[in-house]
Amino acid sequence: MQVQGTPKCISHHQLKSDIQSYPWLLVSYYKCETPPQNNRVKWIALSLCNCKNRVVRQVLPKHPKISSTESRLANPTMAESAYQCVAMQQGGPLEVHEAKPHIPGDDEVLINIKAVALNPIEWKQIDFGINISKWPCVLGTDGSGTVVAVGKSVARFTTGDSVLASFSAGQDHSAAFQSRAAVKAVKVAKIPTPMSFEDAATLPLSYVTATGAIYQGLNIPLPYLEGGREEGFKPSSILVCGGSSSVGGMAVQLLRLALPKAQILATASKQHHHTVKSFGADQVFDHSSPSLVEELKKASSSGEGVEAILDAVNGVAVNPSLFEVLTGPKAFAEVITGRNVEKAPDGVKHSPVFGAAVFGQPGGSNLFAALERLLAEGKLKLPTAVKVVGHGLESISGGLKELKAGVSGTKLVVSL
């Protein structure tokens, strides 16, 4: 439902009289025609003027025609001015605009966003228009904050919960680069008390993408995923390319949980070897070594190579000789980054991975409930260092420029 027009001020007495008289929700007045008396559709308009706050608190929660969800939406904190960091067109710029606040759907959670993490896909979307259907638009996939409202079918969350979420870039209702966004509850997880919003914001995309590569791309079952597949591919050895990236570091940890006895090898820059080993990798190798293929084969338990490769950073596209490390089942899952393998050698099972597709897999609706448990039980570490590059939506543009210039082993975050 949309209400067109601009707000106008009215008297305290007039507002109170109208709210008590009309069977629809009047939170704010707009210069538009009043719905006819026999129209049962509730008129929901969002922005509150300061003079109206006490009337809404006094009258709306008690009104017999207003549901409990709408009563929560009538809380003045729900109707504060909302702001979005908007990508105006391909190539930029990014501009901060005031926007109408969102109302969560029945299966959604409305989040007051406290921190957003920046990912390479976002500057690529701005520069190249990847997966963008319209301009202007709001971007951002990683964020955290506090719950300010929940839809009527949501049971796992309540107002005030500290959460992280997988937001939907390009969808103005649910993208991360704004002050508040409504997200499907299945893509939200509570964060443990000691974790900061800035740290929590770095986890969603890496978790979703790594899970997609393991569970969907390689068909490896995840024992911690309720309702997930119990049968599948269980390799005895696997190579993770880009173990110090956020996706790669998360993948090493999830693989160790799924395959406790498997040999996990990884590539990374030398300065990150110790960190990647702490995630569960048995050995870590310099991705730039001219003898990388020989080193990996020699280190493998079979002496011939590994049964699977999970590529988080287009390492195989850059160095196709890594295909020589594959032996046996020759499974190859590759995260889509924009530079990927066009055609794998014969005999290699090539699975390009787009992380969000994993929600459609068996148990996919429980992915974030699983993440919540893993964090609460201390079974996952932050896959990268965290660097706060600014405060406020205005800082996102500069942060993306820094990310585009090149960052290694660090996730850039903007606090809101």
Image (tube, rainbow, N blue to C red):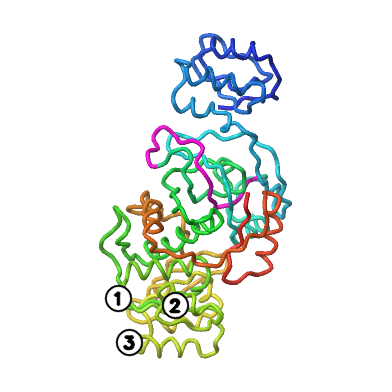
Residue linked to disc 2: 277
Pinpoint residue 54: horizontal percent, then vertical percent: 59, 21
In depth, the one of 45 and 51 nearer the eye is 51
Residue at left offset 58%, top offset 41% = 180
Residue linked to disc 1: 261
Q: Element type at marker 1?
A: loop
Tag 1: Cα neighbours inside 10 Å, few (<14), some, or many (≥20)?
few
Going by the numbered disc 1, the residue's amino acid type is: Lys
- Which badge, 3 or 1, is on the more N-terminal residue? 1
Going by the numbered disc 2, the residue's amino acid type is: Lys
Q: Is residue 115 above or below residue 24?
A: below
Residue linked to disc 3: 302
Is 54 displayed left or right of 258 in the figure?
right
In depth, the one of 198 and 311 nearer the eye is 198
Residue at left offset 49%, top offset 58% = 203
- Which badge, 2 or 1, is on the more N-terminal residue? 1
Residues at marks 2 and 1, CA–CA distance in whole angstroms: 15 Å
Number of the front mark, 3 or 1:
1
Residues at marks 3 and 1, CA–CA distance in whole angstroms: 14 Å
Q: Does the rendering let one see residue 20?
A: yes
Residues at marks 3 and 2, CA–CA distance in whole angstroms: 20 Å
- Which badge, 3 or 2, is on the more N-terminal residue? 2
Q: Element type at marker 2?
A: helix
Assign the N terminus to one quadrant of the image: top right
Tag 2: Cα neighbours inside 10 Å, few (<14), some, or many (≥20)?
many
Q: Which residues are magenta?
A: 137-156
Q: Does the rendering let one see residue 347?
A: no
Tag 3: Cα neighbours inside 10 Å, few (<14), some, or many (≥20)?
few
The magenta stretch spans residue 412: no
Tag of residue 176: none
